[in-house]
Amino acid sequence: MKFADPQEARDFLAAHPEVRSIELMLIDANGVPRGKLLHRDELLAIYEQGRPLPSSILALTIQGEDVEATGLVWEVADADCWTYPVPGSLTLQPWRSSPTGQVQVTMHPTQGLPASPADPRHALIRVIERLQADGFHPVMAVELEFYLLDRERDAEGRPQPALLMNGARPQAPQVYGVYELEQLQPFLDDLYAACEAQGLPVRTAISEYAPGQVELTLEHRFDALQAIDEGVRYKRLVKGVANRHGLQACFMAKPFGDRAGSGMHLHVSLADAEGNNLYASEDPEGTPLLRHSIGGMMDSLLDSLAIFCPNANSYRRFQANSYAPLAKSWGVNNRTVSFRVPGGSAVSRHIEHRICGADANPYLAAAAILAGIHQGIRDQRDPGPAIVGNGYEQATEFLPTDWFTALQALERSSWAREALGERFVEIYLAIKRTEYRQFMAEVGEQDWRWYLTHG
């Protein structure tokens, strides 16, 4: 595992004498950045000696509560675990009101015990290394959809899309609308500028299939770990820039019942050591290697669904004719399937994995995808014929649409324990079981509306 060179810190401090604070962040199992705000005088020591964080930081629910069943709280006396900076992660946070830096850390494999097996970045590194040992170098890119919301709720207390520059609140989807993007120009200008300052390769912006919904794409990277690191930092950046504009960037999978959900599409191909695309083919369906990759992702889909769709709300996204996938299906240039092979030139041939909600942890999602691909290649899994036409009408093997079934599948999965690590799966399941119990125990407005009178 590679950690950053201390010279990175020295160069940053010399180049930015105005910076007084540094946000140190570690990504937990839910994909939530957690950490501390440090003084600049503390930065170099983190690079040279590491920074201790409590073991419980990787044993938290999405609400930030300890999960004792992980074994990372009282059993280990909430021990300090050493983290070190991720190379290339030290940068500015341009959205802050005062000059502030940002550095991402990850657990040291040994000094970070007992928490290091719970670090989701480690799970991805292990999968990538196993692929590389067999001569396959994963190339990936991240697409994230999100809603821009007002901080203020509507008259009924519900979230609502943010006002546009013209003072109007968007009501219609206006998918691919360029006027809608123009109306978001101040936010998008600052977002692109912040991405440039952080070295994030953000490209096309799209007005998505709901009022207030936006998608921006990140450029693919030959280094899959770099691509996912950038996706994680991009999500942090979007929230920060939105907050600076008095808005909320929402990455819930399904924030509105009557509007499109938000997905995280991960694009993947395999290259050789020289960077040549091993999926490249004049055949739109790609090479046998590509089809075996899809076969492996299909076979491991149920085992990894609780990773791709980690929350109760995630499963509200699975609705027919919604551009969200519903089944084990693949096709060429087809947005009604789960695994899409986009059109384009032979050298650009790749797979678009469309199952994840925008609420998924990018590290874990990428690890499960690549582990499925590796299994498919090893076993030469056949994905069956490609779907032509409406995949919703032709679906035969449907995905579960509830959280509990997905968690049960993960718990029973020997594949997931091998792919992600036995200890990681135990910790992840402990967190998610706790969240499930808490979610199901909460009585809210829908319960009262349905059952208060006639229950």
Image (tube, rainbow, N blue to C red):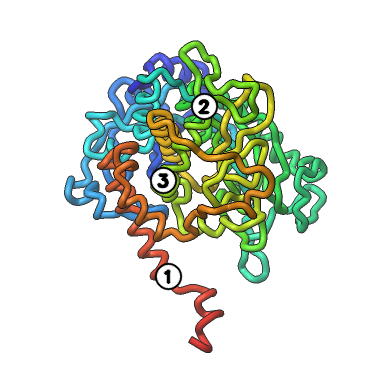
Q: CA gap, disc 3 to disc 1?
A: 26 Å
Badge number at residue 442? 1
Q: Does any portion of residue 312 appear in the rendered image?
A: yes
Badge number at residue 288? 2
Q: Amino acid at mark 1?
A: Glu
x, y percent for residue 351: 56, 33
Q: Residue at x 37, y 20 (%)?
A: 134
Secondary structure of the residue carrying tag 1 is: loop
Image position of 390 (left or right of 294)? right
Q: Decide which of tag 3 and tag 1 comes sooner along the chain.
A: 3
Judging by the rendered image, the residue that carries numbered circle 3 is: 304
x, y percent for residue 74: 19, 51
Whether residue 109 is situated above or below residue 153 in the rendered picture: above
Q: Amino acid at mark 2?
A: Pro
Q: Residue at x 48, y 45 (%)?
A: 360
Q: Does any portion of residue 240 appear in the rendered image?
A: no
